[in-house]
Image: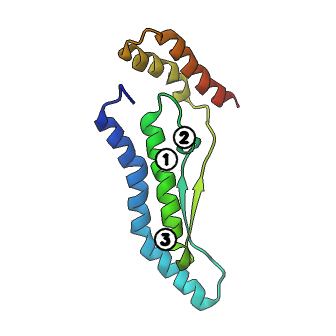
Amino acid sequence: LECVPVEKIRETIDVIAIGAISVSKAFLPLLRESRRKCVELGVNFYPKIVNVSSGAGIASIPMHGPYSLSKHALESMSDCLRQEIKHMGIQVVVVQPGMVKTESAHEWPLLVDRVWSETAEANYEERRQMSVAQVEGLLDS
């Protein structure tokens, strides 16, 4: 987090957490109406809001501060909303997929290099290797 501009942190939280809140709020009237009609018809159907989170929403990953912050916020928002709308028969579900090896996963060591080198820490290489090893270990599991 030290080397990430505050505006980049805000942008990440805005897209992941505030975006999910905005979409949920926009769809809630439709979900309430859907549930009401199902009850009238005797249909056993419970509308759901599904939020895609991450393991980073439970345990933070070094060098992924903005992402972890936003996923923690998404988890909290989902918990709050779940409690607030449960009585309406609307469910809130959080999906937490594991790490996925993608093309961007190969960029991880480059990001770590850039961020750690900007902090000019004396033990840069040791911390760099630790951060890269943590993420690679997650990707391999």
> What element does badge 3 sit on?
helix
Outermost residue on the left side: it is 7
> At 54% across and 86% down in the image, what residue appears?
37
Outermost residue on the front side: it is 122
Q: Amino acid at mark 2?
A: Ala
Q: Which residue is mark 2?
A: 56
Q: Position of residue 116 (x, y in %)?
A: 43, 17
Q: For the residues marked 2 and 3, what is the alpha-carbon distance in whole angstroms?
A: 24 Å
> What element does badge 2 sit on?
helix
Whether label 2 touches label 1, CB < 8 Å: yes
Q: Amino acid at mark 1?
A: His
- Marks 3 and 1, the one that precedes in the sequence: 1
- The image shows residue 120, relative to residue 133, as above or below, that is above
> At 64% across and 30% down in the image, what residue appears?
138
> At 48% across and 81% down in the image, what residue appears?
33
Outermost residue on the bottom side: it is 40
Query: Quadrant location of residue 94?
Result: bottom right
Quarter of the image where the C terminus is located: top right
Q: Amino acid at mark 3?
A: Glu
Q: Residues within 10 Å of mark 2 (few under 14, many from 20)?
A: many
Q: Which residue is mark 3?
A: 84
